[in-house]
Image (spheres, helix red, strand yellow):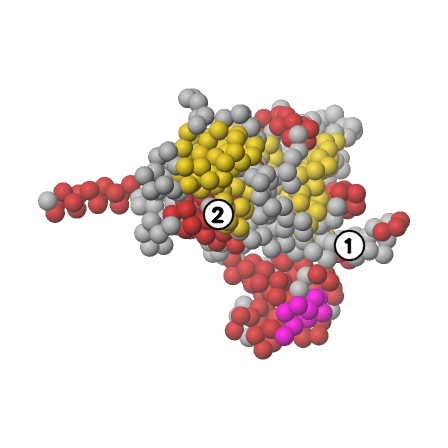
Amino acid sequence: MESIDGSNWDVLIAGTGIQESLLVLALSKSGKKILHIDENAYYGGSEAALSLQDAEEWCKNTRSSFSNATIEVPAEDNKSTKLGFSRAYSLALAPHIIYTQSALLPLLVSSRVDQQLEFLAVGSWFVYSKDDPALSRVPSTREDIFSDQNIDPRSKRSLMKFLRFVGDYENQEDVWKEHAQMPFHDFLSTHFKLPAMVQAPFSALILSPYPPSKTTTAYALARISRHLRSMGLFGPGFAAVVPKWGGLAEVAQVGCRGGAVGGAVYMLGTGVDGIVDNGAADDDDDDDATVTQYKLTNNNSVKTRWTAGSEDALPHTPRDTSAIPTSRSISIISSPLKSLFPPLGEGSPPSAVAVVVFPSSSLSLEGEHSEAEVPPVNLFIHSSETGECPTGQSNCIKAIIYASTTRSSHIGFKLLDKAITSLLQQSLESPQPQVLWRMHYEQQCTEQPTLSINDKTITFAKPPPDLAFDDDILEQVKEAWKAIMNGEEEGDGFLKFPSREDLVGGDEEEENAL
């Protein structure tokens, strides 16, 4: 590759996370000269997917929003279950589910990259409790509710009343608006007379990272409604999907691939070191426009009209001091955990992901933190169908458990391990499933990420702690795209590209007109 030292660009994008990758994809047909860099030696940023060897290197060199990363390889009690080779794993830093009603999916289609992605169904949802049975499947239909022997008739009627309400809650503000900031469990108790036992399944559908006192009615209603409205859109029995081979890392990869096809220049292992000149003359512009001159970590200097990236990738931008510490872990399990992947129903695709939620009431802390309110622990169990762990011989087939909770590492790691141990103890398999490999890490998240545009520098905030893809990310990327295009876009052309057939048809029409 030729040296870029002293070169001029329309847009410099720092980082290859989901926002930056969608932005370069949106700009790929604009004709703009784009330099896309990443200080890491891999694509994906905070949404990267790692092999076992990559994970070891990542732990040694965690930077930006990540900290306290460690890997543990417990002694194997059962010699017949062993880890596969390093590259057989694609461990996702962002195993987020994507609800089928998400705006992301149609945009992947309209930007013509959907054929490069494969999506799998998120199947059964479970909630854990200290009672017997400890693991209960969350009802997904009215028929499931009526057939559930653990719910008394009066509670079933209250449940049905609530489900009718939440399906159209936006048009019934008189019921909930004045209670929008009330803890959701209080709202259910006072307005729908639902006992605590019946409320537990809703914690799974909400997927809240926050403890009950901070999970508000407005927050919960939006997420339950999202789940119910997504159910059955792409087929019976499921409401969400995940990209195969590494979660959101695959979407980021596809975005970068689209950027490269559109002419963007890529440099991995290169980041922004600092600003050399914030009012340099644009050598390629006759209008005396000014640009920003940056020094890169490879000692090259470049000039650009626009800059975009995360606050971690742009060291000269303000830091967010209100971040939420979120503990996460990735565990490779010695068993495929088949009991968590029952058939979803007639005509449904096989389930590749199961969701298990440990509500606040199901876990407790010991010692000096015993009286503290515990946040929920959310587990995503990925089968080998996701491509993230080996398939083939029975002693090689594993499952991956992604765990998350909004407490700092000192306490959070203990909660994650406790939840995973409790889940594995519910297995009737022999020998009992065990953890073969585990990585803990802490990530700094932002409760309400906002986009910053200041003097042609676009800064994306840290991601939220939510485990479902947030469509607000798309709105921020769209706002960044509009700012860079500065009126050059045609209509609402965000991530909407003509198909090959459209282009061919257009050429034929022009020839016919001539």
For disc 2, the marked residue is: 455
Residue span colored magenta? 178-187
Mark number displayed over residue 374? 1
Count numbered badges in the picture.
2
Q: Nearer the viewer, residue 62 or 247?
A: 62
- Quadrant showing the N terminus: top left
Q: Nearer the viewer, mark 1 or mark 2?
A: 2
The residue that appears at 66% across and 56% down in the rendered structure is: 208
The residue that appears at 32% across and 52% down in the rendered structure is: 490
- Count residues near mark 1 (Cα–Cα under 10 Å), then give few for <14, some for 14-19, many for 20+: many
Give the residue type that dot 1 points to: Val
Does dot 2 land on a helix, a strand or a loop? loop
Q: Nearer the viewer, residue 98 or 40?
A: 40
The residue that appears at 25% across and 43% down in the rendered structure is: 503
Q: Nearer the viewer, residue 146 or 13?
A: 13
Residue 25: horizontal and vertical position, in percent?
42, 41
Residue 339: horizontal and vertical position, in percent?
66, 45
Q: Height in image: 173 above or below 318?
A: below
The residue that appears at 48% across and 47% down in the rendered structure is: 455
Q: Height in image: 209 above or below 306?
A: below
